[in-house]
Image (cartoon, rainbow, N blue to C red):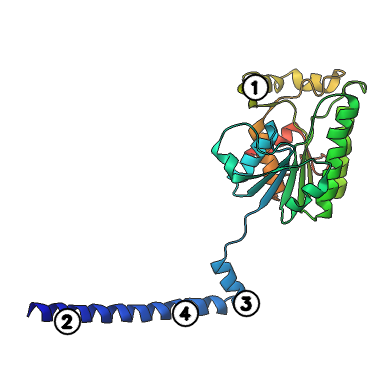
Amino acid sequence: MEQAIIKSARRIQSSLLSTAGRWSGVTGASRRLTTSATSNSSDTSTMQEDSPPSAAKVVVLGGSGYVGQHVLQAALYRGADAVSINRSGIPNTSGSWLSQVKWVAADIFNSSAWSKELEGATGVVSCIGAFGSNEFMEKINGDANVLAAEVAAKMEVPHFVYVSTVENNLPDFLLKGYFHGKRRAEEAVLSSFPGGRGLVLRPSFVYGTRAVGPLSLPLAVVGRPLEVLFRFPPFPSLRQTLPGTQALLAPPVAVQAVASVAAAGAMGDARVKAGEGAREGVLSVDDIVRVAREV
């Protein structure tokens, strides 16, 4: 008797499962038919349903540096695939985010070694810059970034963000190669990526925690108080009137703000815009702080 009851129960269970399976198939088919009927193309509907859109891809030139590392982290935070192109490859630092970045060791002037990394990129962020002799600064700040913009335009990358430096009214002989190289790079970016596709960020002193070998420099200890101080009178007016102080009295800006705006711009975020009346594509220190709050 007990065995007969067990066999009967199994038959009922099998019957119920079979019926549920048939109804599941009908329901699934009905759902697919409904989706197809409400779209222009059944193939497109299936693709959108089964294949999520590809992630954005952000390529950072000079990604092993102080600002570059933060830009990579900001891009990852936004869900983008991140690629760094720099001379040494992966930096000598720690963090779980490092394994999420594709590190490419290449000389920026050898574009054939890295241009293929721009395929499918949503945007490029250049953090390339250096100090040294005027000739050296002109080459790194100017020539390298001009080449990068030209290669990215040739590869039809939609967006290009260049991290430049704050406006200044210093005498021409001070750091001539640095500032002249930066301005040449700005013009190359804006001309190669017109219509708001090219962005130039002009931060002042960028503060945060900066790794220098085994040491960590807490730049915020100095940068944050100065940022607050320089926004109060009389510093804003002095900055515009005293010779040589336009850059020196510019409020410092947090590295997280610069990185967030750069990553958002490279991903085509429409909220990244210059201030009212400013040149299209050029973001001042105040613009960077404002946009960082929005993105």
Q: Quadrant of the N terminus?
A: bottom left
Q: Compared to 13, does 274 lie above or below?
A: above
- Which one is earlier in the sequence, the residue at label 4 or at label 3? 4
- Residue 8 is marked as 2
Residue bearing mark 1? 219
Horizontal side of residue 7 vs 166, given as left or right: left
- Which one is earlier in the sequence, the residue at label 3 or at label 2? 2
Residue at 84% in and 24% down: 132
Residue 250 place in picture, x, y as percent: 76, 24
Q: Label 2, label 4: how many angstroms apart (C-alpha)?
A: 32 Å
Name which quarter of the figure residue 230 lies in: top right
Q: Secondary structure at mark 2?
A: helix
Count residues near mark 3 (Cα–Cα under 10 Å), then give few for <14, some for 14-19, many for 20+: few
**Residue lying at the far right of the rendered structure:** 172
Q: Is residue 225 visible?
A: yes
Q: Secondary structure at mark 3?
A: loop
